[in-house]
Amino acid sequence: MGTHPTIAALTLGLGRAAFEETLKYTQERISGGKPIIQHQAVGIAIADMAMNLQAARRLIWTAAWVKDHPEAIEDGSVERLPYEHMAIAFTGTAVQRLTEQAIELFGGAGVIQGMPIEKYVRDAHVQKHVSFPFPSRFKITEALAGFKRKVDLPPFCI
């Protein structure tokens, strides 16, 4: 499948695990006489998390499919875009934001060492740096604008 979609998929798995843990917690945690997921602000955060996961998943699938079917770009049935870089940059950022939203929903319990969400937040920050989202964004810009940077990125960022 290729390095970028694979890293993005691993990052997505981390985000999915954090989301599932958060969804479970918000259904169990009671505040104001009802599960916190029934509070509007919590519901909106959960919806945003789910939408970002689905968007990342679709971008990863597209990147993997285009990598396996380069003829689709050549014949014009798929737009010529840097899907691999888009997938890795979007997923890394989305999962970091998702875990930060999750820890907010957990409140004080979220920062207790040993809580699953605390580890997911830590892992998401590490994963964002492993996936090199900024060089990927540079590559996206270059592809969209049709130019090449004068300074080459290190090979591990390409």
Image (cartoon, grey):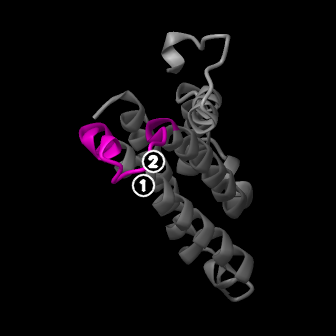
Is 108 inside the magenta-drawn segment? Answer: no
Q: Residue at x 67, y 75 (%)?
A: 44
Q: As rendered, which of 23 and 137 lies closer to the eye? A: 137
The residue wearing badge 1 is 57
Q: Secondary structure at mark 1?
A: helix
**In the image, residue 131 above or below residue 87:** above
Residue 143 located left or right of residue 33: left
- Expressed as whole percent of the image width and height from the top left, the position of residue 35 reads 62, 82
**Residue 69 magenta-highlighted:** yes
> What percent of the width, then of the height, locates residue 2?
32, 30
Mark 1 and mark 2 lie on one chain; the one further toward the N terminus is 2
Q: Which mark is residue 12?
A: 2
Instruction: Give the Cα distance between marks 1 and 2.
Output: 7 Å
Q: Residue at x 48, y 53 (%)?
A: 56
Query: How busy is the neighbourhood of tag 1: few (under 14 within 10 Å), some, or many (20 plus)?
Result: some
Residue type at numbered disc 1: Arg
